[in-house]
Image (cartoon, grey):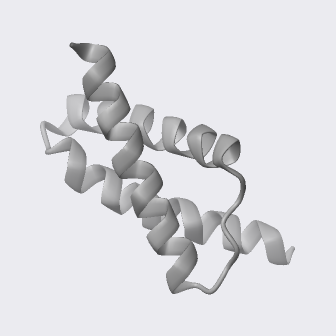
Amino acid sequence: MMGFIRRQEERLAISLLMRQYGKRDIPAPELAELKRQSGKIIDEAHRIARERGKNVMSIMKELVVDFKKKNDKSDTV
């Protein structure tokens, strides 16, 4: 069961990442990189949810936006 849930979270995170790339008119990386990024976002969302008792999906949305902001800044440096 956990494998199914994790895959669904990964699909959602990839979808959110793709939306953020599209909003910024930035070409999305390859699927392997998107999966790596989504894994980091999911892990962080679960950690925050444990600490704060919040909904994982809302945390993931926040993290995707923050993740993209950080990556955009590092691309320009």
Q: Is 16 situated above or below 8?
A: below
Q: Is 8 situated above or below 28?
A: above
Task: Indicate left or right for 8 with 27 as reference.
Answer: left
Q: Is residue 45 visible?
A: no
Front-lying residue, 71 or 2: 2
For residue 48, which quarter of the picture? top left
For residue 54, which quarter of the picture? top left
Q: Residue at x 21, y 13 (%)?
A: 1
Q: Residue at x 49, y 73 (%)?
A: 20
Residue 40, position as x, y percentages in the image: 53, 38
Residue 16, position as x, y percentages in the image: 40, 62
Task: Indicate left or right for 74 with 22 as reference.
Answer: right
Q: Residue at x 34, y 61 (%)?
A: 62
Residue 4, position as x, y percentages in the image: 28, 22
Q: Residue at x 71, y 59 (%)?
A: 29
Residue 51, position as x, y percentages in the image: 23, 32
Q: Is residue 55 visible?
A: yes
Q: Residue furthest right?
A: 77
Task: Indicate left or right for 21 with 5 as reference.
Answer: right
For residue 37, which quarter of the picture? top right
